[in-house]
Image: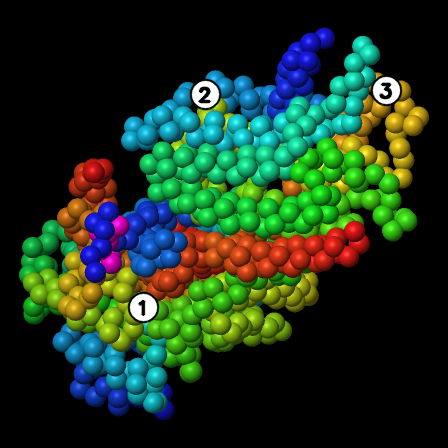
Amino acid sequence: MDYDPVCQIDRDPDDLVTINIGPTHPAMHGTLRVIAKTDGETIVSAEPEIGYLHRGVEKLGENFTYHQFIPLTDRMNYCSAIASNVAYEMAVEKLMGIKVPPKAQLVRTIMMELARIADHQVLVGILGVDLGALTPFFYLIIQREEIYDIFEWYNGARLTNTFGRIGGVNADLPDKFHEKWPTLRDTIRKANEETDALLTKNRIWLDRSVGVNAFSAEDALNWGFTGPCLRACGVKRDLRRDEPYMFYDQFDFKIPVGKHGDVFDRYMIRMEEMEESVKIIDQAYAMYQEMPEDAPLMAKVPKIIKPPEGECYHAIETPNGELGFWIRSDGSDKPYRIKIRPPCYMVYQAFGELVKGDMISDTIACLSSLNIIAGELDR
Amino acid sequence: MSLKERVQRCLGDDVIAITEYRGDLGIEVPKGNIVSVLTRLKEDETLGFDFLTDLFGVDNLDYYAKKKKKPKKKAAGEEELVEEEEDKGPPPPRFEVVYLLQALKTNERLQVKIRVPEDDMEVDTITTIWKAADWPEREAFDMFGFKFRGHHNLRRLLMWDEFEDHPLRKDYPLEGKGEERHLSYD
Amino acid sequence: MEDWIIDLIKVVFIWVWCLLIAVVMTWVERRASAMMQDRLGPNRAGPFGLLQPLADGIKLFTKEEIIPEKAKSILYVLGPALFALPAFSAYAVVPFGDKIVLGGKEIILQVADVNIGFLYVLAIGSMGVYGMVVGGWASNNKYSILGGLRATAQLISYEVPLGLALLAVVLLYGTFSLREMVFQQSGTFLGFLPNWGFFKQPLGFILFLVAAYAEASRVPFDLPEAESELVNGYHTEYGGMKLGLYLFGEYVNLGTLSAIIVTIYFGGWQLPYVDMSAFLGPVAYGIASFLVFFLKQAFFLFLFVWVRWTVPRFRYDQLMGLGWKSLIPLCLVNFFITALLVQLTV
């Protein structure tokens, strides 16, 4: 049968539209970029392109002294800078064989868990915004500001904290913390309840998140996932439990685990981890109060830090997952090589596989739920 | 059995050197055997290193040179003599690739290192074992210039595609060489 | 007074009224959302930030008019106009009050009491999609085109439930004239309820409301402009007053849709149980009827804002599924039940 030539559309089966999402796009937190090939609204392939926030932190680290490097770690995961600071400090302490006094460890624990709550609050809020629900964002961000108040009382910085020193912390918990924490604990819980009521029980939210970007545990391990993204896939792995550092082996807390590794699981795990973090802070604070007032906050550390020759790797569980530092010292006052193992770097490389076959809207939801922080990703 | 013994039993002759520092066990293996070594470490029942934490390169350009310098300060007048004295044997290969492995069941960690000489930068890819090695290998290529044989998409990751140098090498100046990125919009 | 002068005054009045609603709505939206989100909202320009819309208007008017180099310039300029005009025009047949007696002349508070007002509303309402599609196409931007395509599919899909829900009302009232429909809603229903379309057509009302939200492309149906996915959808490339017209048109649309909901389902200008004309003078009655209509309209305008800041956004396929698989079958069921009941009771 002869076709009317007018009706014959010359269409190549690979005739796809390339959409360049980012690096400046409302949903690309920071400077992420995804080159997506779409067939209508469906993603055929998505390739993340990174490096727009690359500042050469590792190269700078080779030219800074050990203490000078701490402020650079703030700028990695700026949503929870304290966790990055502590991760680095602990790696150097391991390299030098320093034992940090228990009171300093408790101060670190409390501040790190506060940072974890703040980080998760941002994530849940932004996930809501990216799916069109703006209101929970404000409920959570108000609480985050309260947490940042505590950080500000501690050393004057809200976002990039430069918390602690190698060998301990430079200051005790601020006085106002003792009044603030009991009320803050309640308001954090209340904000979470309100968010829960607006999102978790919302049918549209469930439609948008349940089953979206489901990822199997096997794939997640193969791709090097850590942290909440891995736990959402059903793998119970948390360095706080598996390789206990500080006092985490003495605290009583649950490790929430998901089942399907979809957006909803990632969201729920963050919601539950906030609650667990509140519990951890309560326990750490109780231990802290038993400490004598004049307990030391710093270990004996030489003024100029010159670790002996050698190399070691140390990782802790930051809000995003395993953040590790591999440091090689050549005996001088500067690290010979610092390698940072950012958690979202490993997660983001699987992005193309995660969103394949989904719709454009799901891409945005997926990206938000993975919590990709450009500062940490590109270093 | 300690981890060290189990690793030695599993790998046998492939272990060139073992280092242990602050509880971190590191082994050096021959460059050509890296894929088989990692596969054995992953599949061995007593070890089960089934998780690739990270992969990265190290440039040891001045690491050994610095060691030589140490006595130099003490005897400033005899610089040349000292250097000749210190020059024992051929220098070790300039680059290293370090693989950080993790065993999820036993929570053990292991560092596997290979030495890569400057004139032979080809390394076998391990993306066939762990997909997680995809970007770290690209980054190691970007920063040091390792050529990962068999990598499906070995392009620059953090630096732009037209960039020519490898910035994490020790001989690359901190302030750069004045490269500028010119974007062309077509 | 000549008839045409009266008509002209009414046209101008409605025009200004629509603009006023849109302007005030921009303020209400911000203040109400701020209230819901524990923040202050605009509070610098004038008392309670009431002059904020004015400041925005001045900003939009004085901004540089940019037409992207590769945009199709005629269509690019035409888009916002095509979007805003139908929104204003639909108001022409809405009865915004009963009648007022001025200088011994009886004036009905409606620009044109056409006997096919109902069809006119549907026809003009579906014109709005051209503004989105033309704007999206002419911008020569992939996000804009995607937004325009989404708008096409969404608005055409939701025309159907919108029309079907209204068709059941037509069966009920037996007329196409909106004014006639309001008159039929006086008195009581079942002895104690106001005789409003809402009580006779509860399912129809909910279906119409959902379809209306989709027609207005507000959250949860704001897919054409979904700012986190498509930057700003069909008006990504627009700026200055052209963007202002799009934003304005959206609020005028809300006003129109609220007015239609009030007219068809909530008794228009009538108060329940009370006949205002019995005890008010002719001038006062005219004003009072208009105020009652406006209060009802204001409630639905606020409902739009309320919903917008409460729920997330649908995904494209879910939106289509809701429209075709849920709303349309329900509309048909509603239609047949209404037909049956009307047949049995007449």
Q: Label 1 lies in what chain? A: B
Nearer the viewer's eye, disc 2 or disc 3?
Answer: 3
Q: Residue furthest top?
A: C1
Q: In terms of depth relative to the viewer, which is nearer, A157 or B52?
A: B52
Q: CA distance from mark 2 to mark 3?
A: 47 Å
- In percent of the image, x 15 and y 74: which residue is there? B31
- Which chain is indicated by disc 3? C
Task: Name the residue beneath numbered marker 3.
Answer: C282
Q: Tell me if mark 2 has few (under 14), some (14-19) or many (20+) residues whose alpha carbon lies within 10 angstroms of its own.
A: few
Q: Is residue A11 part of the magenta span, yes or no?
A: yes
Q: Nearer the viewer, mark 1 or mark 3?
A: 3
Query: Please, what is the three-letter code of the amino acid marked with disc 2?
Result: Lys
User: What residue sits right under mark 1 in the picture?
Assistant: B132
Up/down of B176 relative to A307, above or below: above
Q: Tell me where the magenta segment starts and ends, as one range.
A: A7-14
Secondary structure under tag 2 reads: loop
CA separation, marks 1 and 3? 81 Å
State which quadrant residue B177 falls in: top left
Classified by dominant secondary structure, the portion drawn in magenta counts as loop
Residue in view at x 89 percent, y 20 percent: C281
Instruction: From the image, state whether disc 1 or disc 2 is nearer to you.
Output: 2
Residue C63 circle label: 2
Q: Residues within 10 Å of mark 1 (few under 14, many from 20)?
A: many
In the displayed structure, does residue A176 sit left or right of residue B130? Answer: right
Which residue is nearer to you in this view: C48 or B144? C48
Circle 1: element type: helix
Whether residue A270 is visible, yes or no, is no
